Image (cartoon, rainbow, N blue to C red):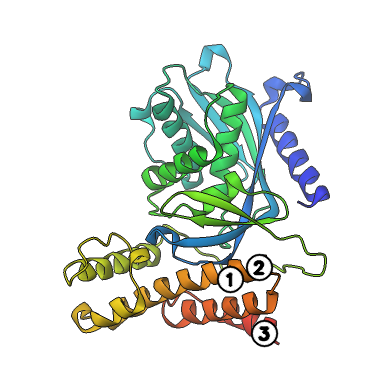
Amino acid sequence: MGGSDNVDVVEQAVSLFYSTFKQYANLPREALTIAAAPGRVNLIGEHTDYNDGFVCPLALDKTTVVVGVRAPAESASISKLTSASFPGQVLEFPANNTEQLDKTQPSWGNYPKGVTAVYLKHLNRKEPLGVHAAIASTVPLGSGVSSSAALQVSFATFLESLFEIDGVPAIQKALLCQTAEHEYCNVPCGIMDQFISSCGKKDCALLIDCRAKEPTLVAFQDPDVVIVVCNSNVKHELNGGEYKERVMQCQAAVKTLQTHGHPQMTHLRDATMSELDAVREALGDEVVYRRARHVITENERTVAAVEHIRARQYAEAGQLMFESHTSLRDDYEVSTPELDYLVETARG
């Protein structure tokens, strides 16, 4: 994690806290609670997490930081938040009653609001989780590096530290944040983003079995290898219609497999290419077939790529990453001209 960037974003969050909540001008910095969580890049395993498959992300040296204090006793049931990414906005919401924690505008506020709600429910907590806090981040928004998960996990970690909440393991925290994104942000996301932000370790990738909810560290500490992460500067939103459409197409493929000899299947994780090919005509939709083909072959590529990384066979792992992009471009249709250009440039 880049040291100077981390210091800068912490200082930005601290400065924003004091400039927004002027009543704390005399509060020493040492009295503030500070929590952080990273964004991520996925090496391989795209659109497999919500299909119960395998993914292999890596935590970035870009983080989201939350700085703040408990709300004062006279307004302990109200949270107030501000974000450097959305200047001039101060979000205010009740932090003691999940029935009142409705989705609202600005939309970024649904992430900390959702985390507050699921923690209240999970802990069966009657005492409020009201805070005054400022948020700053070096994770680019809408760039596919999980700025939303970094916000959720950093805010969850902030609540745990501030209110001395024990007994929430990293995996449970990831699952709670995923629930928050489902219920408060209307995004039917898989588990990858929250898992790597909560469970990631320095110098390691993370192989995640999204069915078993089991993360396995994959050592990635070779001085001769550098991972270059490029920002295409093309923005996207997971709550857009295309993402939900892909989820539904995968579910449609599973339903066809279930009704054609495989009733035990619940996700595309369970299917092989030969089984998918056998129902190609029954699917009645070539697009659905291609979506399913991507997921099935991507699971195979992900498991194979991890074995190559462990064996330090980086050229072989890289070839699988190129194949993954081709599948994402042609079968899943989620690439862009800018991404295609970057991949071809990397291919040399």
As shown in the figure, which amino acid type bears the numbered disc 3? Arg
| Residue 211 can be seen in this image | yes
* Residue 266 located left or right of residue 118: left
Q: Are marks 2 and 3 in contact (CB under 8 Å)?
A: no
Residue 254: image location, x then y, percent: 26, 67
Q: Quadrant of residue 161?
A: top right
* Residue 287 located left or right of residue 217: left
Q: Which residue was labeled with disc 2?
A: 309
Dot 1, how many residues are within 10 Å of its Cα: few (below 14), some (14-19), or many (20+)? many
Q: Which residue was labeled with disc 3?
A: 347
Q: How far apart are marks 2 and 1 (CA)?
A: 6 Å
Q: Distance between the residues labelled 2 and 3?
A: 18 Å
Residue 13: image location, x then y, percent: 71, 38
Dot 2, how many residues are within 10 Å of its Cα: few (below 14), some (14-19), or many (20+)? some
Q: Which residue was labeled with disc 1?
A: 305
* Residue 263 located left or right of residue 93: left
- Is disc 1 placed on a helix, strand or loop? helix
Residue 123: image location, x then y, percent: 43, 25
- Is disc 3 placed on a helix, strand or loop? helix
Q: Earlier in the sequence, mark 2 or mark 3?
A: 2
Quick check: 204 above or below 105?
A: below
Residue 222: image location, x then y, percent: 78, 64
* Residue 347 located left or right of residue 248: right
Q: Which sits in the foreground, 227 or 153?
A: 227
Residue extending furthest toward the bottom: 348
Q: Which sits in the foreground, 291 or 299?
A: 299
Q: Do the residues labelled 2 and 1 touch (CB within 8 Å)?
A: yes
